[in-house]
Image: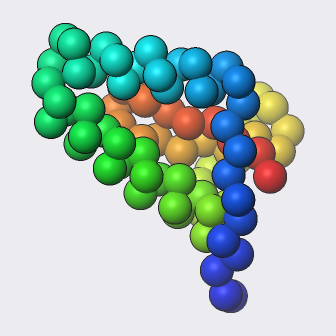
């Protein structure tokens, strides 16, 4: 099947949480830790954009998928 390349739209809550997380990574860890996380997130978002069904569905919420970005960060999405 061809890749879909869907647009990704973050909720207001997701934008705020991401901003807080990136600030935390830079202040408490390092700029490198922040950049490494951004690269992992970008890779995950690209995968979701191209292959939205590639991550498992939630067993609790209908039509919600779960993408593990890092051991500490899970991204939930629907399409």
Q: Nearer the viewer, residue 70 or 20?
A: 20
| Residue 78 point in image, percent of width and height | 76, 45
Quick check: 34 above or below 28?
Answer: below
- Could you tell whether 33 is left or right of 69 in the image? left
Identify the residue at the far bottom of this view. Answer: 1
Identify the residue at the far right of this view. Answer: 62
To which quarter of the image does residue 2 belong? Answer: bottom right
| Residue 11 point in image, percent of width and height | 72, 30
Q: Visible in this render: residue 53? A: no
To which quarter of the image does residue 28 belong? Answer: top left
Quick check: 62 above or below 42?
Answer: above
Q: Residue at x 46, y 41 (%)?
A: 68
Q: Residue at x 41, y 57 (%)?
A: 43
Q: Residue at x 68, y 52 (%)?
A: 8
Q: Residue at x 64, y 80 (%)?
A: 3
Quick check: 69 above or below 22?
Answer: below
Q: Visible in this render: residue 65? A: yes
| Residue 64 point in image, percent of width and height | 75, 40
């Amino acid at each position: 099947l061809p890749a879909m390349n869907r647009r990704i739209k973050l909720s207001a809550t997701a934008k705020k949480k991401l901003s807080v997380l990136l600030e935390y990574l830079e202040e408490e860890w390092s700029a490198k830790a922040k950049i490494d996380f951004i690269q992992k997130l970008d890779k995950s978002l690209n995968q979701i954009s191209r292959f939205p069904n590639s991550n498992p569905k939630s067993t609790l919420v209908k039509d919600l998928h779960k993408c593990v970005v890092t051991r500490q960060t899970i991204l939930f999405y629907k399409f």
